Image (tube, rainbow, N blue to C red):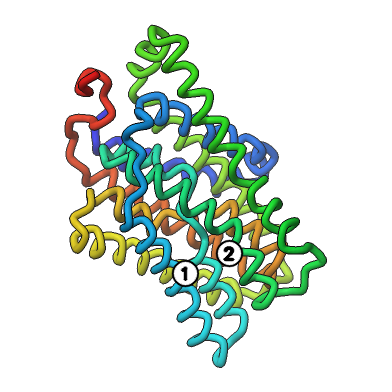
Amino acid sequence: MTQRLRGILPALAMLLGCLLAPYLSRLSSGIPLCISGMLFFTFLRLSPRQVVLRPVHLYLFGLQMLLGAVAYALLLPLDELWAEAALLCLMTPVATASPAIVSILRGDVGFITAFVLLSHILITFIVPLVFPYVGRESSLGFWAMAWEVFAIVFPLIILAIVSAQLVRWLLPGLATRLNKLHETSFILWLCSLLLLMGHTTEYITSNPEIHWQTIAQMSLVGALACLLQFTLGHLLGRFFGLEPHAARQSLGQKNTTLAIWLALLFLNPLTSLSAAAYIVVQNVVISLLMARSEPRRDPLDPASEQR
């Protein structure tokens, strides 16, 4: 598949998702399956020894938390809703699908996989500490809230990692054949993007009582938060000498499913509009990166790995 086509297909998927939203929203339960499938094919080509935690992972996570806290403090005197939306968009951890996207972009999958695991473990404990004090009161205690966050995220990651490694170890011939299906992760991402845009569009259009000014304001917060984090990821990647795609996605690509769930459960539900806008902007950025990226040797190509 040509790079030009890679850049066009995501835009078509987003457009079709918006146009077919009433029908696609009924299939939104398929989004986790698409993401889990993407992760399976990515982890199938990833050796566990490539997933190494580094101090820079903690720096990046700490920066996200600091950005969220600063944005909340600065915006709270102006508008509480803006403050909550900025906090949500900045503190939400990296997307579970980001290793698959970095793999498609031929980036450092081991680096971002380690960051996915670390950021989701830490956010499991940070959400119960922070969100009850900035949003609505919750009847859930600390451990109950931590379990809720864990349950929505980790089954996808754990299932994909365990199943992929079992296939690698027990059925190496099958793993080799599956590794030759180079476009599978990209196709699954397009399917998830199609369903996600349909679900997001239906969510917004099914709430006509929301004023257009509120939609515009929340969308602006989400869009600015997205562009800021992709830019910071690019700059910090150069500063720390990281692989560019892994660095950008580490800060810029967010677990928006988790963000929307947190918004609806703990914050003002209108903040989920910022997460919805974030979905659109982050996928536009990813599409542009795919269109611009040069075909290179795949760092996860089993043929290139010394065993």
| Tally of marks | 2
Q: Residue at x 44, y 74 (%)?
A: 66
User: Which mark, residue 126?
Assistant: 2
Of 59 and 96, nearer the camera is: 59
Name, please, the residue furthest toward the top: 173
Give the vertical position of 288 relative to 162 (above or below).
below
In the picture, the quarter occupied by the C terminus is: top left
| Three-letter code for the amino acid on which mark 2 is drawn | Ile
Left or right of 70: which side holds 198? right
Instruction: Check contact, mark 2 vs mark 1: CB within 8 A.
Output: yes
Please tell me how crowded label 1 is: few (under 14), some (14-19), or many (20+) other residues with Cα within 10 Å.
some
Give the vertical position of 75 relative to 136 (above or below).
below
The answer to whether residue 222 is seen in the rendering is yes
In the rendered image, residue 32, in percent from the top left (x then y), is placed at 59, 38
| Three-letter code for the amino acid on which mark 1 is drawn | Met
In the rendered image, residue 198, in percent from the top left (x then y), is placed at 59, 46
Q: Earlier in the sequence, mark 2 or mark 1?
A: 1
Please tell me how crowded label 2 is: few (under 14), some (14-19), or many (20+) other residues with Cα within 10 Å.
some
Q: Disc 1 designates what residue?
A: 65
